[in-house]
Image: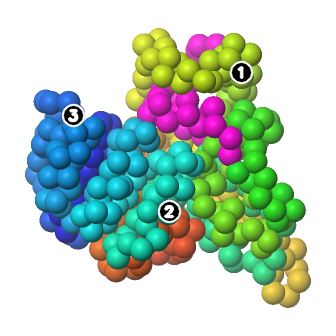
Amino acid sequence: MKIGIIGAGKVGGTIATLLESCKFCKSVTLADVRANIDLAGLKKSRFVQVDVKKPAQLADFVATVDVIVSAAPYYLNKAIATTCAKAGVSYFDLTEDVGTTAYIQKLAQKAKTTFMPQCGLAPGAINIVGGSLASSLHQVRNCEMRVGALPLNASNQMKYYLSWSTAGLINEYCQVGEALHGGQLVTTMPLDGVERITIDGTEYEAFNTSGGVATMCQTFAGKVGDLNYKTMRYPGHRDLMKFLLQDLNLAPRQELVTQIFDQEVPLTESDVVVFYVSVVGTDENGGLKQRSFIKKMHGDTIHGRKLNAIQLTTAAGIVGVLELYAKRKLGPGFVKQESVSLASFLGTRWGGRVYGD
């Protein structure tokens, strides 16, 4: 299978790195508007310069591969997915943007190829785990999904350093989200719903952000009482973000905030991903059960490349579903994350290595 990756940044490069050891992948072509992309150690990969904003260049690139993976900023994904639909090429991405996912879901209604957005960490792996745990019970009272991509240490006031897409980070802090309450769809306000969680003796705060539930509210409406996703940070971070984005009214100016963060907030390579899912409900015998999936994940060195935790967990999420696609376990049209069983995901090379025991 020939795989094209649009966006040759940290995550795009990490996806290519993991694909090096996957037998289902024949070749990888990384495309980016920038030049001089480092492909050292990646024998299956080559680079081409493509400007996604130029439709002819994008169409020419899509026509050369069997599958497109978008690791580009979320606001470019509609154009990429549309081009894939016209070319009859399967499409996967990492977006957390609700509007983009809704667009792709509509686009894929008549598609004969696979369209699967939201394939990373959260949304992505968190929904595979949450959906599987919720489906394991007869009736579900609540399903809580929490993820934190955090620096191992931070001395600044907001107790946070950058480790992934700044545009995606700011977008999920600014947009409304979705949840189920009493089995019904509700809208959640960004940065609200603050709670405290202690895992392995470390205290975190969790609060509403957008996109993390993926399509689970559609799938489990009327079947699960309360279902929600929250982002975890070290205590105090949320208050500063609310001051910046809401009190100073900078949420409508996401590009400016992204520029400030990219310029003034350090990028860390020492990070940890904290992954938490808890489901409470009754089994077929009526017994009340609580089932959970809790894991802390760190970076690693793969094929001579040092990968931080958020790179590795995000890339493992999408490479795992690409393996399932290669094995013909994903159907045509729009594919939801929660339609993938946890057992199948953990049975993949990278899903099992990163998220398994």
| Circle 2 SS class | helix
Mark 2 or 1, which is nearer the eye?
A: 2
Q: Label 2: few (<14), some or many (≥20) within 10 Å?
A: some
Three-letter amino acid code of the residue under disc 1: Gln
Pinpoint residue 222: horizontal percent, then vertical percent: 79, 71
* Residue bearing mark 2: 105
Pinpoint residue 311: horizontal percent, then vertical percent: 40, 42
Three-letter amino acid code of the residue under disc 2: Gln
Which residue is depicted at the point 44% across and 33% down?
165
Q: Earlier in the sequence, mark 2 or mark 1?
A: 2
Magenta stretch: give its range. Answer: 148-177
Mark 2 or 3, which is nearer the eye?
A: 2
* Residue bearing mark 1: 246
What whole-number distance in Å separates the C-alpha atoms at marks 2 and 1?
31 Å
Q: Earlier in the sequence, mark 2 or mark 3?
A: 3
Q: Label 3: few (<14), some or many (≥20) within 10 Å?
A: few
Which residue is depicted at the point 20% across and 30% down?
34
Pinpoint residue 130: horizontal percent, then vertical percent: 64, 63
Three-letter amino acid code of the residue under disc 3: Val
| Circle 3 SS class | loop
Pinpoint residue 99: horizontal percent, then vertical percent: 55, 48
The quarter holding residue 339 reads bottom right
The quarter holding residue 197 reads top right
User: Does residue 59 appear in this view?
Assistant: yes
* Residue bearing mark 3: 33
The front one of 272 and 101 is: 101
Question: Which residue ends up furthest to the bottom in the rendered image?
Answer: 285
Labels 2 and 1 touching (C-beta < 8 A):
no
The front one of 306 and 193 is: 193
